[in-house]
Image (cartoon, grey):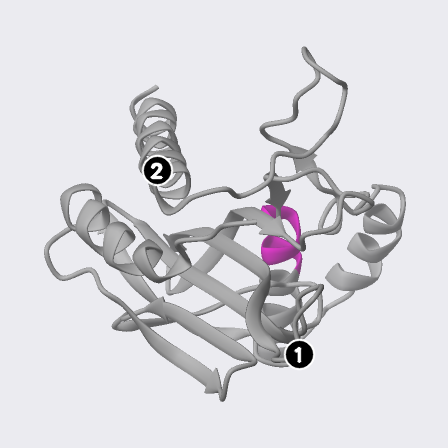
Amino acid sequence: MIKDYDKLIPNLNEKCKLIIGNGFLLKTYKKDGHKLLIFNNIGSFKAVNRLDGDADSEVDVCHWFGRYYLYIEVKFVFDSRVPKGKRKADIVITQCSISISVFKSLSEKIIQLFRAEWDDYDNEQICHPQPHWHITSDTSVANTFNEYAKEFGENGFMAILEPEKEQVASLKKFHFAMKGKWEDDMTHSTSIESSKQVSDWFSGLLSSIRTELEYIDND
């Protein structure tokens, strides 16, 4: 588990200004005493994030380049624990989660394409690979079809589409592994150890994503 978590947000803000733009800033979104601390980016546009039914689904996204937008969130969860041999409890971090969502503007909609996440729950028994990808573009397009049908009338279109959707496996909850240790010990997860490790992964990931998006746009 990360020890220097207090350095992570300043490090990410510094790196992201070079990668995303000078206006980028991660700021405090939610704080609950010594239990919870969440940061997210400042953004001038609205979009739907986490399309698996979470209540707080509309978020502020910031423009990245071309028709692409980002939503970034960092969460720290803490707990009070008494160290062995001591009487006084210490506040320790029990979860560190980083989420990067990529969006694209299509006509008048900004839809989510995919999301990269890295969660460390300080628990080696967690079954999902860390870090990982979530592919959400299929859900975004399906939701867009539903919205258009409600606005302009179905005319039988959704009745035709719905059976076809049922035949395709939904991937929105699938965790596509990104950085397992398969060549060493076959574990699917890499723990979060330091702010430098995360910020290096963060900047490398965004650089790779942009390269691929520009490639498919220019193909």
In-image side of 22 versus 49 (left or right): left
In-image side of 39 versus 117 (left or right): left
Label 2: few (<14), some or many (≥20) within 10 Å? some
| Residue at the farthest bottom position | 33
Q: Amino acid at mark 2?
A: Leu
Q: Give the camera-side residue of 85 and 202.
A: 85
Name the quadrant of the C terminus: top left
> Residue 97 in magenta?
no
| Residue 86 pos. (x, y %) | 65, 71
Magenta-colored span:
136-142
Q: Which residue is mark 1?
A: 87
| Residue at the farthest top position | 183
Q: Mark 1 and mark 2: span between their CA atoms?
A: 45 Å
Q: What secondary structure is the magenta-colored segment mainly?
A: helix
Ranked by sequence position, the earlier of labels 1 and 2 is: 1
Give me the residue at 45% from left, 84% from top: 31
| Residue 32 pos. (x, y %) | 51, 87
Badge 1 marks a residue whose secondary structure is loop
Q: Which residue is mark 2?
A: 206
| Residue 46 pos. (x, y %) | 38, 73
Query: Is the residue 212 above or below the residue 167 in the image?
Result: above
Q: Amino acid at mark 1?
A: Arg
Labels 1, 2: front one: 1
Label 1: few (<14), some or many (≥20) within 10 Å? few
Badge 2 marks a residue whose secondary structure is helix
Query: Is the residue 197 above or below the residue 54 in the image?
Result: above
| Callout count | 2
Give me the residue at 76% from left, 43% from top: 124
Q: Give the camera-side residue of 130 and 41.
A: 130
